[in-house]
Image (cartoon, rainbow, N blue to C red):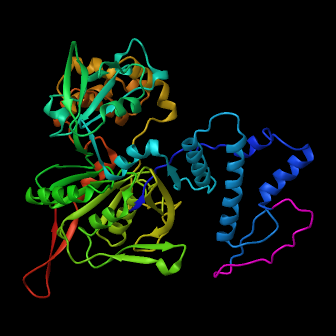
Amino acid sequence: MYICGMKKTTAVLILLFALVAFIFANGTPEEQQLFFQNLMNNTQPQSQTQSAAPTRSNSSGVTFSSTRGTSYSTGSEIISRDMATLERLYQYVNQNFLYDIDYDAVYDAMANALFEALGDKYTYYVTADESDDYAEEVSGTYGGLGIYFSKTYVDYQDIDDESTLYAVITQVFPGTPAAKGGLKAGDYIIEIDGQSVVDMEANDCAHLMKGDVGTSVELTIKRKETVFKISLVREKITVPTVEYSMLDDTTAYLRILEFSSSTTQSIGEALTDLANQGMEKLMIDLRDNPGGDVDATLEIANMFVKSSKLLSVSYKDPSRNVTYVATDRLLVDEDVEVAILVNGGTASSAEIFTAALKDTGRASVFGTTTYGKGVMQVISSFGTGYTSVTTANFVGPAGDTIHGVGVEPDHPVDELYVEDDELDAYTELIENNAAAAFVDAHPEFTDMNVDAFAAQYASTGIRAEVLRVVVRNEYLSRMDADEVPLADVVYDPIAKAAYEFLQSYENEVENDTPGTSVRVVNF
């Protein structure tokens, strides 16, 4: 499976060499030192001097050398020699180390150290203990309850603020055990199978809630002042990677959270549904999309682009280089105008998709420059774990470099953020719950009330657009999850710019009269 994502694990290094210096059990110090030198050089004790072997090159003319030993060797010879040396060292430790050896831990540490030494943050080893969670990330499926939740780090909890103590449900997936059980966004999970979550981190809670399909888990839920227990049966959960809705009669919104193996079908179903609802214009939101499965990404791009280059991939071995070209099988009509929303969190496969539609003229891009990850990894099972190895780099149809550069938007629009000189006032506003007090007094979510809040706190020095978003967020937090709009084309500057562009684009349509055309302008 080819993967372009922003995933990484921390290698645990074990210093086997340091052990040897302390646990020589026999021989004089001189003999011990000679033994160690011979061990590291992969030679037998002897008095004669070894002659150096000549320098050797591979077929590309690149010379490989090593500072260990006395010869210059090809890469494969270096590996063979080093593995033999490492085996002898490991055998020595095994025979002489005083305490019991955790062989699994040593293996994982050596594998991690190998990948860490390559110096590429996208190339790593996933241990057996981490492999189940990693497989879920890649496939987008797991046995669970069907919720997203948040949990404050234990070190940052506030005993007087229960929202920091418990796991807070932020989203319930439709049709899942959680939805069937009546759980709602905003519910607090205070116990899992009788264990308090207060001293747990988010990962601990997730591990307890996940499990084999068909098994049960009991949650203790706090909803406002009511506390109750509910037993849920775990089911196979497909993590939602797609959200969509119609913004008006003709404008559709599609958010792709990541590109996993389950995304292609979901996108196809979403686009078909939107077309049936009258889609003529489409906003695709790829902001903070970390990437994912390249094959899925290209299949989705093929739904929009026909008979054009989509991606060029270059490998270490040039004979493997490949260019991907779209077929002529479109799912989205060519008359549908497309706008893509991106930011600095749009990465990897999401950049492939963006470049493919931008370079072929199929979409206009709004937002800020993307992350700039233009290399590809192969994800493979290895023993009971996984490996991720960078194997290629890629460019879009125009041939522009992506890695370290990113994809530039056609229409640059800055994201809304709190500036440094606003930070103190903003922090005071939030800590004083100013928005909550205002909404209590003005419960109707209207533009008039939003503007009134901005005017009331204009003296703080905080920009009006920031104040509007603060109170907007308070109104949204009080809505049921299914009532919250997916896109905000009023207070989100990037979404607003893209929406306004789609409402005013011009499209040339051929008239029935030969030699003439009609310019259709949508307002």
Q: Residue at position x 44%, y 28% from top?
A: 461
In screen coordinates, is 26 left or right of 431?
right
- Side of 318 where 222 appears, left or right: left
Q: Position of residue 345 (x, y in %)?
A: 42, 49
Q: Is residue 421 above or below residue 301?
A: above
Residue 15 seen in the figure: no
Residues rendered magenta in the picture: 44-61
Where 167 sits versus 172, above or below?
A: above
Q: Is residue 51 magenta?
A: yes
Residue at 10% over, 53% down: 249
Name the residue located 38 percent from the left edge and 21 percent from the top edge. Answer: 164
Q: Quadrant of the C terminus?
A: bottom left
Residue 195 included in the magenta stretch of the image: no
Q: Is residue 417 above or below residue 440?
A: below
Principal secondary structure, stretch drawn in magenta: loop
Q: What is the quadrant of the N terminus in the image?
A: bottom left
- Judge left or right: residue 467 versus residue 90: left
Residue nearest the viewer, comparing 347 with 415: 347
Seen at 47% across and 60% down, the residue is 406
Residue 316 lies, in percent from the top left, at 55, 73
Q: Nearer the viewer, residue 309 or 62?
A: 62
For the question of whether residue 234 can be seen, the reply is yes
Q: Nearer the viewer, residue 18 or 421?
A: 18
Residue situated furthest bottom in the rendering? 514
Q: Position of residue 137 (x, y in %)?
A: 36, 48
